[in-house]
Amino acid sequence: MRSRTLSKDISLEGAVANLMQVVKENAGAETVALMLFTEQELMLRAIVTDQETHTCEPVSVATTHAVPLSIINKVKRSQKPLVLDNAINNNAYAGDTYIQKHQAKSVLCLPLIDRGKLIGILYLENNQITQAFTNERVEVLSLLCSQAAISLENALLYQESQNYAQKLEQTQLQLVQSEKMASIGQLTAGVAHEINNPVGFISGNLDCASDYIQDMINLLNLYRQTFPQPGEKIEEEMEAIELDYLLEDLPNTIDSMKKGTQRIAEISKSMRTFSRGDTAAKVAFNLHEGIDSTLLILKHRLKANEVRPEIQVVKNYGNLPEINCYPGQLNQVFMNLIANSIDALDESNSGKTFTEIQAAPNQITITTEIDNAKQQAIIRIGDNGMGMSDEVKQKIFSHLFTTKGVGKGTGLGLLISRQIVVEKHGGQITCTSELGTGTELTISLPNN
């Protein structure tokens, strides 16, 4: 019965709680303290008194003053049980500060040994009577400790495996995030660099061409004023090329080309903004620039197509100051969240006609504001898609969880986003969603 009780829980917390309960029921002790080794240092893990049980975070026994160190060190060296019928009168241990302070009487200290390895120590104390720990009780408790040592060692190994699994998951996320940001950064930075040179060349030449063409137009108009009778052939050619329309439209064409090059330059700037690789230290960054650059990169996905009208983007920007952050990583968060909103809207359009979607347009709303009370910058990215159930909402930040079809999602986007916001920036990311209404992700970042 005791064996089953001690081994019924594989978790370390459960194994510790079970041991303390069984020992308290069988020992006749007022105080029971459990110590376990962590990287060769003895740490206090739980202590039971007549009033209550305390399961604590591992703390070094040497600093707790919760047990007599002279007795603990003796059992640690000998790896054998130590029984004191009246510790305060025992010359070998009466000088211990703890023994003097608590006037300890009956003491029993037992090693926890599994397969020849000392994994911990169990300390028991009764200050009401002497000789509380009889031979029979010591024998029973020694047997319990043998069983407990196996359970605790298994629990420690299980916890270690869980820690390794968690570290592996974190490493995987960091690798995916690093590779994703590196590939996106290299791509966008490379494209931006390649665009810049020809755009600069074209823009510079357009200015010159505009001046040249205007000079030619002025000269041609002067000729027309000076020679009002151009002759039959010239008149025929003027009619063939629609000279009046050409003179009117050519400057407009040049202006349009200038605007086009300016637009390409803006795209190039947005790509450089998006691909920023500031990872060594946080830098001051305008979050609106990051959001705008992300929207520009995703513009092809927002445009109208054969199955739906354009997705409307509503920007409710507040007066945000520059935030100290890692811009490239936050841009990745914006990319993940906005791309997810587009996916959600496309999914919600399934089965609807173009006209039906047009009547209730797809919309992504981006709101920013400062929470002065909490000194936080708030970014809300929401859509009016189909929303999520409570069950799905609880899992969206889970490892490898995705609602997308096979080959369409890795289940890492929101998890990586959460890691960037929470672990890298000390912020928060939360989700609000309702079926049939839509979804909103809220990012809170420290404004300092």
Image (cartoon, rainbow, N blue to C red):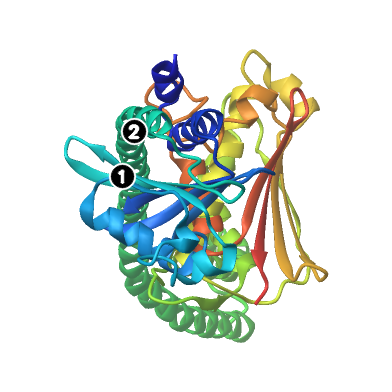
- Residue 228 placement: quadrant: bottom right
- Most extreme residue toward the right, as rendered? 373
Residue holding disc 1: 81
In the rendered structure, which disc, 1 or 2, sits on the residue that comes first in sequence? 1
- Identify which residue, 315 or 262, lies in the foreground: 315
Residue holding disc 2: 142
- Residue 182 placement: quadrant: bottom left
Query: Which residue corresponds to the image point at 75% horizontal and 20% vertical from the top-left?
Result: 356
- Percent position (x, y) of residue 438? 73, 32
- Percent position (x, y) of residue 5? 46, 20
Q: Do the residues labelled 1 and 2 touch (CB within 8 Å)?
A: yes
- Identify which residue, 422 or 270, lies in the foreground: 422
Residue 233 in sight from this viewpoint: no
Q: Is residue 96 above or below residue 228?
A: above
- Residue 284 placement: quadrant: bottom right
Dot 2 amino acid type: Ser
